[in-house]
Image: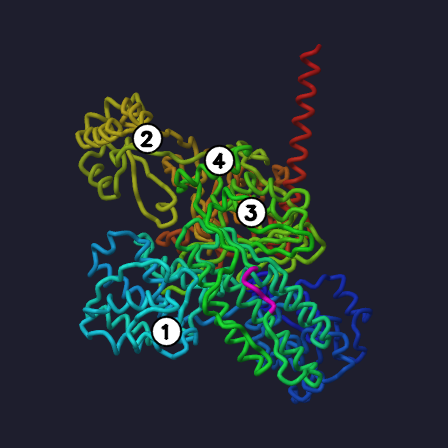
Amino acid sequence: MKIQELKEKLTVLTKNFNKENFIFDFLISFGISKNIITRLKKGDSNLSKKEGELLYKNKIFFKEEFSGNLLDVIDEAAKDDKILKHNPRFILVSDYETIVAIDVKLKINKRFSFSELPDQADFFLPLSGAEIYKVSTNNEADRNAAYKLGQLYDILVQDNPDWVAAGSHQLNIFLSRLLFCFFAEDTDIFSVKNIFTETLVNNTNEDGSDVDQFLNTLFRKLNSKTGDFPEYLNSFPYVNGGLFKDDIISPKFSKKARNILVESGELNWSEINPDIFGSMIQAVADPEQRSNLGMHYTSVENILKLIKPLFLDELEDEFDKNMDNPKGLRKLIDRISKIKFFDPACGSGNFLIITYKEIRNLEIKIIQQIIALEKANLFGGQSFVSNIKLSQFYGIEIKDFAHEMAILSLWLAEHQMNLYFDEKLEGFGKSEPILPLKEAGNIVSGNAARINWEEVCSKNEGDEIYIIGNPPYLGARIQDEEQKSDMDFIFNSFTKYKDLDYISIWFYKGSKYIDGYNAQLAFVSTNSISQGQQIALLWDKILRNNIEISFAHTSFKWNNNAKGNAGVTVIIVGLRNVTNKQKYIFTDGVSKPAKNINAYLLDASNIIIPERMTSISGFKKMNFGNMANDGGGLILSEEERNNLISNLPLSIKFVRKLVGSTEFINGINRYCLWIDDEELEDALKFEIIKNKIEISKTHRLNSRDKGTNKLATRPHQFRDRNEAFENSIIVPRVSSERRSYIPLGFLDKDSIILDSAMAVYDAQPWLFGILHSKMHMVWVDAVGGKLETRYRYSAKLCYNTFPFPDVSEKQKLTINEYVFAILDERAKYPEKTMAWLYNPETMPKDLKHAHQNLDRAIEEIYRMGNPFTSDAERLEHLFKRYDEMTKKDTLFAKQKKTRKKKSDLS
């Protein structure tokens, strides 16, 4: 249930309520079934027998109270063991002017006026079985560091063109060493606080002329156990780990560059998330990524959206269950210490590092609880050490530098968590020092599309494995030759696999990896893999036998720590072996339990809807509009059309109104020349028309496409020649998802539809009504493709697959009446555009009402006398009907084939 949908129900409730039925109508708004409401009214399920009270197990305790002392009453109820033993999620007390409520689980109190009840929809949402899903983080320190580093990069590149030209490897190593030094001086890796920045300031010239020499010498010192170095470097330790192993030449510094370097050192790097170290360097140092510094690392918030439902929430629940059981807590620590975490496209380690930190945080909470339970039995000086090791973390990364940074960043994360571990355990924690660095983490350099994942992260008996990450998306049209070769390597036995996104490799290989093992996966992906034709191409191969979707985040904008943010629209999909454990769908931050999650990320059966060439419901054929391919020669602006007709009135017979998606939605007037072959001689008598046709001919002759060259033989005509004899329905191919309905048009025969829209020529009004209904809209939203989150209409996927019952002539006439009512309402606003008319904020009430009347009429055809109450219910019905119709279609085809065989034999 969407929040907005719930608010609308509560608004109706507050405006039209009676005290006797209020609490029952309130529960109905949250999807509580009518059967349960009936039992509550009878008293069978009402565990309170007092008048004016309702106690519904695991849901709510409600009490009417007219004494005016609501706070005292709810406080008393919140302490009443007779109520609490039935585990109500909410306690609610009201005099129907004011409401006071408590979320017992979250311990949140609310007091508001009765009329404000709709504004509290998200507070009461758990009554529907859903939860508001929130994660929070503050990454200001990350952003400051990233942008300061970007400033330094810019000036070093500007001042050192020869140094940059020598290759990116040296630049990347240099930046990674600076990052390590900044972090080390603020987090006690270096024994003296601020030692790097202070030594730099005190031992280099203000003009920056010797900074490069200082850094070259320092880097050698950090790679040496002994040696002859300046005295001011004696306090720097031996680091090892390969970071300072190779000799590099540092760039020349100006005064400005030195100042930025010092300012960078003055930031508090102890607050930096190590997960961004490598990603910052990549975003700073990669010229292709410089336009959006910070865009290329993933925020903690987004990573938590994946790892929480995949494994972290379950581990947290296990901790809560064993809060008073030291043995159970120690068992949980042992379990966590053996889990394998594997990112087969790890980049610089974002997902692995955040996972590591979250697991360490959980371990700390568990140990704190053990200490609280057993403190009296702990011997003096006894210390806990972390059981979580970096060797539990596995990754594959194709870029050498990112691979190295993932390893380094894991070490930095370990150091940060060791400090936190010792601090939080207050004398009961003792961590080993990080220096000198040692080999750690199972991060390999290679192509995850080609590598056998089991060679990187082996699957052994008793293992518990979670595969995580944000693999490369890359739609079919933007894959390079190497990536296309990877697709061939993985999917050569598939049909039409070349239309799949590159990330399909990870979902397919991942599903094979976890099959039959105690392993699960979840990946971030662009939403395109759960839409349109990719459903049939990919998911039919994955959701077979043992594999199911365990949870999914439906489309949301990808946020990160950058100022500009990455504007990509993504989903998160989790896969596991089939089990009876609960599944969840997350939409707009709200989690909802699901019986099953299909490839469209809907709570519905695993039906997969492939493209069809004809309408399953027997509708008239839908076509593309007309492509001109004329270099603009045959198209006229409104001004050009008016001038032409004003000067040459007889030319009007060759001019038609031209309507595409943009023109129709935004009310833009454009026109075109539309000339039949037998009219050409007359048309060429007009010099202006002749010149326009010549533009078209030149364009086609100059094209590199042979098909376009052939069109030069008829330069007076569009490439396509589709037109109506009476009327046509125009369906924009792309439309905003904010609209409740895609704006459709019913055009006269003189309008020519462009190929930016779909068209049904010479259709009856009742078909317009069906396509303009809410039933069709929820189908389009579910099975059609998307452009980001906007609707993208397809004849093969949206129109031809739409299941509609057989419709009688009487029903057609009824639909026609509602269609004309909608067109009449539109006609009242001749100066307004379709964009305005169908904007949810400006849509006229009477037009909305006319659509609602049409919706009810259409839904009556699906099931008479039993209206749908939600989009989820509509979709469930549509999927079921589609399944029935395709089975019937298949049976009919088999029978036809059998009859043909018999006929041939006879």
Q: Nearer the viewer, mark 3 or mark 1?
A: 1
> Residue beneath label 2, please?
718
Q: Nearer the viewer, mark 1 or mark 4?
A: 1
> What is the C-alpha distance between the residues marked 3 and 1?
40 Å
Q: Is residue 604 magenta?
A: no
Is 452 in front, or is 725? 452
> What is the C-alpha distance between the residues marked 1 and 4?
52 Å
Task: Identify the element where label 1 is drawn.
Answer: loop
Q: Amino acid at mark 1?
A: Phe
Classify mark 2: residues with Cα within 10 Å, few (<14), some (14-19) or many (20+).
many
> Residue beneath label 4, please?
488
> Residue beneath label 1, please?
236
Q: Amino acid at mark 2?
A: Phe
Query: Position of 355 compared to 236: left or right?
Result: right
Query: Position of 870 compared to 528: left or right?
Result: right
Q: Earlier in the sequence, mark 2 or mark 1?
A: 1
Q: Majority secondary structure of the magenta segment?
A: loop
Q: Nearer the viewer, mark 4 or mark 3?
A: 3
Decide: is 525 above or below 222.
above
> What is the C-alpha distance between the residues marked 3 and 2?
53 Å
> Residue beneath label 3, please?
453
User: Residue at image x 58%, y 33%?
Assistant: 618
Q: Nearer the viewer, mark 2 or mark 4?
A: 4
> Can the viewer see residue 454 in this picture?
yes
Q: Amino acid at mark 4?
A: Asp
Q: Nearer the viewer, mark 3 or mark 2?
A: 3
* Place of residue 91 in the rendered image (x, y in percent of width and height, measured from the top left): 68, 78
- Badges 2 and 4: C-beta atoms under 8 Å apart? no
Q: Earlier in the sequence, mark 3 or mark 1?
A: 1
